[in-house]
Image (cartoon, rainbow, N blue to C red):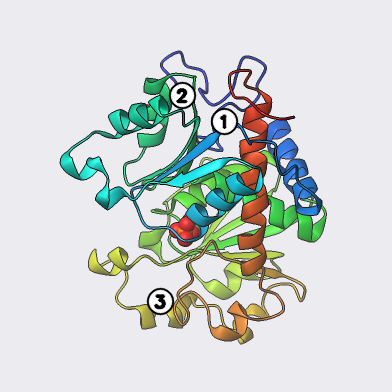
Amino acid sequence: MSRHNLPIQLNSENNIIHCLEIQTLPLSVIEALIAEAAQFLKKYPDNLLKKITVANLFFEPSTRTLTSFSLAARKLGATAIDLNIPSSSTSKGESLIDTLRTLAALECQYFIVRHSDNGAVTKIAETIGNHVAIINAGDGSHAHPSQALLDLFTIKEHFNRFDNLSVSIVGDVLHSRVAKSLLAGLKTVGIKKIRVVGPKNLLPKTFADENITVYHELEAGIKEADVVYLLRLQKERMQDGLVPSFDAYFNKFGVTGERLKYAKPNAVVMHPGPINRGVELDDVVADGRQSLILKQVKNGLYMRMAIMSKIAQHRADIPTCR
Ligand code: CP
């Protein structure tokens, strides 16, 4: 929430003007983004953003998010720059906000920001003012809204509905920005059967949401699920002593072809990437007929186009060719 106690990412008509988190996005906005992404998958306006410049500022590594935002901007006709953070003046101590102000002075209008600090991207949006659009590409363990939106798009595209689906999220829910955003998005679209599955020390003890139940056994946690969503096991969890070894994790929570049979026969497997083969899942599952992992990557391109397009639609100060 902003200092005015309103979600800063929405205007007074509840339209999206920044994309900072999914928790305060109304269902109408999520549905509109999914519809726009589905439309762009068929055909997109290749000059929609031709008058704007998009700056990607990634203070943490990325393959999917950085590349798909960069390509999405270019496909819509924008100029896109991917600031090389290690060789930028941030290495001389220039602050995040001064970096953005400098690039805004160079007429960048969109900033796609990934940062290790929880809340850093919202803070930028609150500080820099509404003459530019800020999009959160992942901040700390707080939020990854474009990932959750592309995941919802992928689920909707595959099943053609959200009603009566059972979704199991397996892994490090406690520290995962992907899980936090996905859980919020699943709730908004009305999914009522949500299970989180993993070791006790990688799951929150309780959830305020009555639709979420906690499991510590994989087989029971994915039984009859429609969607088995696997989270990446981060190496630092082993360094923190929360996981004894990758092998131990795989033995208990790794999804194999045999274990996937506990889910529904036509269940799908999703993962935000990057995947750890032999840790969260084996090759048979990663590359099998039930895997939507590369579909998620592809849909990310079109969802990120939709996010940039919808923001431009609701901002008179961002020039488009609509
Ligand atoms: N899912 C995701 O955020 O992947 P990247 O870190 O490669 O962007």
Please identify, in this view, whether the residue under mark 1 or under mark 3 is nearer the observer.
1
Asked whether disc 2 touches disc 3, contact meaning CB atoms under 8 Å apart, the reply is no
Left of 202 or right of it: where is 46?
right
Give whichever of discs 2 and 1 has the lower sequence position.
2
Q: Amino acid at mark 1?
A: Thr
Asked whether disc 2 touches disc 1, contact meaning CB atoms under 8 Å apart, the reply is yes
Quarter of the figure with the C terminus: top right
Please name the residue that numbered disc 1 is placed on. Answer: 24
Q: CA distance from mark 1 to mark 3?
A: 34 Å
Left of 84 or right of it: where is 240?
left
The residue positioned 73% from the left and 31% from the top of the image is 28
Q: Residue furthest left?
A: 92
Report x, y in % for residue 257.
62, 85
Please name the residue that numbered disc 2 is placed on. Answer: 1
The residue positioned 50% from the left and 78% from the top of the image is 254
Q: In the rendered view, would you say 298 is above or below 185?
A: below
Q: Which mark is residue 249?
A: 3
